[in-house]
Image (cartoon, rainbow, N blue to C red):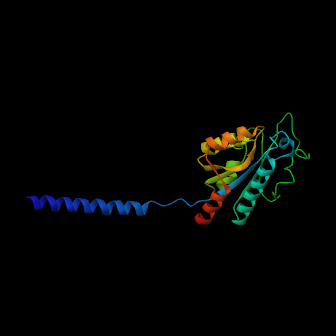
């Protein structure tokens, strides 16, 4: 009787293990397809940010751009324009600061709300490129970047802020945002891209 029970238990265990192995094989990994969102680094808004972090943030934004260019990954330029107060699209205030190494060929999204997904083609652009992960940099950490970060979650993207590539009117507030939201430093982003692509 004991042999029969042991034999039956062994058969059930073997079948369970084989079934678990087959189930594991059938689960497919989603391919990692990241993009970089460079948000609102426009002349009109840059001067109202805490200048103590400006040089470091611009260096990290440019480093992020370089990194995504190196891997030939999409970089999306996000611009903010208030319908009543501007800045006008043809003005110098509307443009990104010359200190940021963005190229005209990068897709451009003009938003009128804090969240770059609200009433724009951003989600459509990302879906067409089959993007599933987003890295965000720019300004303001306490405004449009944070709002867009929440929007990424609403649209089912994995998303991360890039540490030290953010600005806000108060550097302490930027630090708080980096501490409470999913944030990665660029060394970690580089490691991830090196090993996931």
Q: Is residue 178 visible?
A: yes
Q: Quadrant of the C terminus?
A: bottom right
State the residue in front, 76 or 54. Answer: 54
Q: Is residue 137 visible?
A: no
Q: Position of residue 76 (x, y in %)?
A: 74, 54
Q: Position of residue 127 (x, y in %)?
A: 64, 53
Which residue is outermost to the left? 1
Location of residue 80 by image quarter? top right
Q: Residue at x 83, y 39 (%)?
A: 48
So how many labels did they put on this image?
0
Q: Residue at x 80, y 47 (%)?
A: 54
Which residue is outermost to the right? 91
Q: Is residue 40 left or right of residue 10?
A: right
Q: Position of residue 131 (x, y in %)?
A: 63, 56
Location of residue 17 by image quarter? bottom left
Q: Residue at x 71, y 48 (%)?
A: 122
Q: Residue at x 65, y 61 (%)?
A: 190
State the residue in front, 98 or 17. Answer: 98
State the residue in front, 1 or 51. Answer: 51
Which residue is outermost to the top? 84
Q: Quadrant of the N terminus?
A: bottom left
Q: Position of residue 161 (x, y in %)?
A: 66, 48
Location of residue 32 by image quarter? bottom right
């Amino acid at each position: 009787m004991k042999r029969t029970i042991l034999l039956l238990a062994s058969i059930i265990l073997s079948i369970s293990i084989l079934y678990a192995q087959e189930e594991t094989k059938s689960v497919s990994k989603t391919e990692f397809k990241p993009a970089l969102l460079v948000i609102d680094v426009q002349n009109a808004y840059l001067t109202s940010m805490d200048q103590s972090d400006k040089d470091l943030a611009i260096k990290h934004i440019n480093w992020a751009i370089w990194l995504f260019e190196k891997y030939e990954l999409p970089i999306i330029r996000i611009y903010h324009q208030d319908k009543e107060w501007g800045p006008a699209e043809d003005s110098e205030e509307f443009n990104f600061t010359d200190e940021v190494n963005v190229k005209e060929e990068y897709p451009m999204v003009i938003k009128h709300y804090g969240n770059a997904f609200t009433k724009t083609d951003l989600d459509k652009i990302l879906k067409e490129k089959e993007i599933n992960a987003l890295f965000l940099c720019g300004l303001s950490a306490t405004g449009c970047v944070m709002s867009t970060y929440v929007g990424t979650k609403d649209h089912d993207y994995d998303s991360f802020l890039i540490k030290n590539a953010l600005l806000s009117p108060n550097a302490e507030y930027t630090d708080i945002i980096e501490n409470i939201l999913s944030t990665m430093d660029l060394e970690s982003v580089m490691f991830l891209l090196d090993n996931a692509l």
